[in-house]
Amino acid sequence: MTEPMLLTERVGAVRLLTINRPDKLNAFAPGLLGLMDAALDAAHADADTRVVVITGAGARSFVAGNDVASLAALDPVAAYRDMEAGHRLMQRLHEFAKPTIAMVNGYALGGGFELALACDFIVASSTARFGFPEIALDTMPGWGGTQLAVVKMGLARAKEMVLTGRHYKVDECREFGFITRVAEPAALRDETLALAESLAGHHPFALEMAKRAVNRAAELPLQAGLAFEATSYALNFGTPHARAGFHRFLSK
């Protein structure tokens, strides 16, 4: 019986999505984008899911990029459609209403690195490796990596990672700014779930509004960003949960 490519697990208010191709270092395969999109639909519709965590099966790899054999068989039009599908998933994660965490347990390369960068947080094993190896194949990142890298680590670092094609160790990446926390392999799951549970303790709509406002800060001029923040603040301010939060504070 064929193992499913994507596994789903509930841990309290956290929904854990595991890409399950360990024999291929969890490289993306045809159909996996659709499975992830459906899993995000389910997470969005479930009020009891407050945080989504994404990881890879096994101890060696988060996602070691795209399936090169499948990519090599595409014609230019099919390749463009594949890039569009990748963009839709990465943008959806970037804008997802609930916080998302990449639990990086090993190689996060190419499309896998793009997947991690699309999440709100990256919790990395001390043995993790990050990189965009596409340039070594005389191509380039195509699922949003050139854009997400600039947003998450700045222009100079993004150019370094995209144009050299190197694999970077966690210690090298700490100063790049895209890693939230680092844990030893045995403690990675506990460290990730601790972060997820701390996020799950806040009201989901307040989190959603705050996340959107922070995202806009990287995309809009200051005045437009401030206007978006004010609107988001006012929208949340009028809700019963926000009023209750003020009353809780004042009663202490």
Image (cartoon, helix red, strand yellow):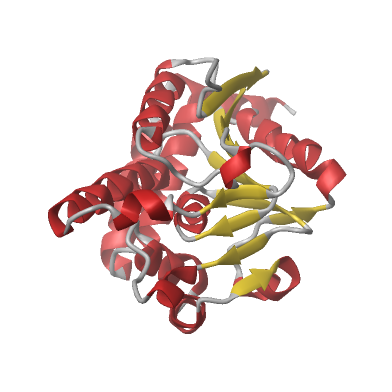
> In the figure, 126 relative to 123: above or below?
below
Considering every residue shown, the one lying at the far left of the view is: 77
Taking the image as drawn, is residue 203 in sight?
no
Question: Where residue 202 sits: x, y (%)?
Answer: 60, 31
Q: Quadrant of residue 102?
A: top right
Question: Where residue 155 sits: x, y (%)?
Answer: 43, 80
Say which residue appears at 36% left-offset and 76% top-offset: 138
Taking the image as drawn, is residue 92 in sight?
yes
Q: In the shown orientation, is residue 59 left or right of residue 40?
A: right
Nearer to me, 37 or 109: 109
Question: Where residue 88 sits: x, y (%)?
Answer: 28, 44
Say which residue appears at 86% left-offset and 43% top-offset: 186
Q: Quadrant of the N terminus?
A: top right
Question: Where residue 110 sits: x, y (%)?
Answer: 47, 60
Q: Quadrant of the C terminus?
A: top right
Q: In the shown orientation, is residue 66 left or right of residue 56?
A: left
How many marks are shown on the rendered structure? 0
Say which residue appears at 43% left-offset and 25% top-offset: 39
Say which residue appears at 72% left-offset and 34% top-offset: 193
> In the figure, 108 relative to 211: above or below?
below
> In the figure, 111 relative to 33: above or below?
below
